[in-house]
Image: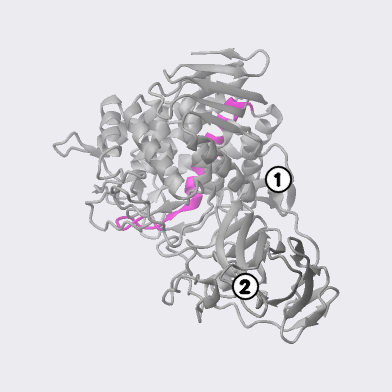
Amino acid sequence: MDLTVPTPTPRPAASAPARPPRGQARQPAATGHGPPPGGRPGELPPAHHALVCVALPGLAVSAEHGQLTGQGLEGVYHSGRRLLSRCRLRVYGRDPLTVQGRLTSAGRARFVAVVRSPADPGPDPGVSVERSRDADGSERIALRNTTGRPLRLPVELALGTDLAVLGAVVSGRPGPELPATVHGSGLRWTAPDGAQAVVTADPPPQDALASAGLLRWELDVAPGATRVVELSVHAGRPLRPAGRAGGPHLPDSGAEADDPRAARLLKAALDDLRGLLVRDPAHPSDLHLAAGVPWRTGPAPAEALWAARMLLPLGTRLAVDTLRGVARSLDAGPGPSGRVPGPLRDAGPHLPPVCTGVEATLAFPAVLAEARLWGLPEEDLAALLPAAERCLDWLRTAVDDDGLVAEPGPAGPVRRAEAQAHGHRAALLGAELLEACDRPGADEWRDRARAMRRRFRRGFWLDDGAGGRPAAALTAAGRPVPHLGGAMAHLLDTGLLGAGRHADGLLDEVRAGRVARLLGSPALDTGWGLRSLGAKEPGYNPFGHRAGAVRVHETALAVSGLAAAGYEEAASGLLRGLLDAAEAFAYRLPEMYAGEQRAEDGAPVPHPSACRPAAVAAAAAVHVLTALVGVRPDAPARTVALHPVRCAPLGAIRLSGLSVAGRPFAVRVSRLGLGMVEEAADGLRLGV
């Protein structure tokens, strides 16, 4: 089963805070590296220094030294259960000295270490050790003799596990290690609930001591030769990660640009996204994206829909599967409500918690409408349309007498600005969807959208002597919440209509220009991305999820929204900052990082409990690159328009492996900002 782990305070507000692992221990001194210290009770264990290999439902979390010590999150996990918590290698009775540990892909890590043999005459080590650990539970240990004489290497692996579920590991209550039994060419552990873990080794060990959890070899290695020990960790049968089966959900795509970082960012994002693909247990042919690891591998409809929407340029298959899964959650809900179920989450220091299901409900018709424009097959559209209509029916009940979206919550209804943007987008894109499918209600939803615009411009805009700004929300009593935050980027994300048109937004041209200036101001732009709360606002915390941290997907939405509205300079500045941050994170963008202001020779500061990789962050990387080339398809009309960013902030760029109307699509934009289609479906015309 997939497991959703309680997220850290303040997100979500309704979940109990997790406790860190007890007894954090130092890594053995011989490696020269130690795990970061644990936190106080009530905090998540640190993960920002860990090497996280992901190929869901498999996960391997390691420190840079490569030894699995059983501390914190370290271990090999399958389907949310830790199958191996300790895997400590010794050669000549000592830990190898690790000189490098790094990820080689989303699902694999490589560790290089050295060992001095007792007969080494000088300081140079005579044995090198390379460990390659995979999220699927396999590990390869290669020992190379770099001396000029034959060696007999005594090799020992100390293994152990608690078979704890990930939630117990996160909360610091994994339980004691279980006793092992000898099983074939390795060891086996069995939990009281019947779960088991098996480790097999090739070649088989000469000694297997179950009481100590030890496997031992005496390996004869000729000069210059290498001996390999291969391990397999499984729960009774080998793991089959969903994202490694290939298929159309995330096809191979590539970027070529004057700035080489664009290609690296896209490659890393696709690698991470494939690792985050999971199967619907009840419908194994359907895949969707988990929100992120290590904390959030269970169902998260809002994040899954956001990611699927940003990935539509790569094809509609992932969106179809995601929408189907969300539609089934509507069918499983009690009563006639069309709201997607979801937990409460923190909304920042100035607003009460809100329901994630509201965001997913409002996203559903918009994702379906845009997927249709990218080439969604008609049979899928017909099957999903009733669920979109149910979501619109719920929106009708959620709009108050003033025409605003009132989100239910524990402190009464709240009217957040970003929820108004989501509701307005759902209304306009839903209207076009209904009209295209010959369903009633299109005119009603366009009328409702006009009423939302009038009410928003009248009630949400605050005059401040500097041009004004939108309120973050209106309270249940109608009082504006004036605080400045990056969530205003949602106001520029209006959605795509047919014939390459963007939908009308809640803002008029003057107000949109003011929002563009605010998004590019030092109050919000850190130089690495947008703060979720302005630096001078009460309650600002650079590590606060909605109180000042940089949320990657909101920065990406700002880039695309600014570019579409013609504010290319502001869009380019945010894009370059995001790309600089991606480079600092080795192109694996976390869901968020600290909102501290960029300084000369500085680097973005990690958030200790951010998911990394995260679906919306990886999808945001794809989103900003495709926003540069400005592809606006209308597959039913067999047209595609190009609206590239004319200032070409990354120089010339070419994107290939995209998909429009179900066929491969490639586009190039020159240094002068001129776009050219290089590959497209037969009969697809270039629009305006």
Decide if residue 438 is on the left or right side of residue 534. right
619 magenta-colored: no
Residue extent of the magenta highlight: 346-375
Q: Position of residue 105 (x, y in %)?
A: 61, 50
Q: What secondary structure is found at the residue carrying circle 1? A: strand
Q: Identify the disc placed on residue 45.
A: none
Name the residue carrying label 1: 286
Q: In percent of the image, x 56 and y 44: which residue is there? A: 268
Q: Nearer the viewer, residue 148 or 637?
A: 148
Q: Which of these two is toward me, 24 or 58?
A: 24
Question: Alpha carbon of mark 1 to alpha carbon of mark 2: how far?
Answer: 51 Å
Q: Mark 1 is on which residue type? A: Asp
Residue at far bottom of view: 211
Query: Horizontal and vertical percent for residue 397?
Result: 46, 43
Foreground residue among 559 and 652 = 652
Which residue is situated farthest in the left direction here?
A: 465
The answer, for residue 400, to whether it is visible in the render is no
The secondary structure type at the circle numbered 2 is loop
Q: Residues within 10 Å of mark 1 (few under 14, many from 20)?
A: many
Q: Which residue is mark 2?
A: 116
Front-most of residues 511 and 385:
511
Q: Residues within 10 Å of mark 2 (few under 14, many from 20)?
A: some
* Numbered label tally: 2
Q: Quadrant of the N terminus?
A: bottom right
**Which quarter of the figure has residue 178?**
bottom right
- Against 56, residue 521 (above or below) is above
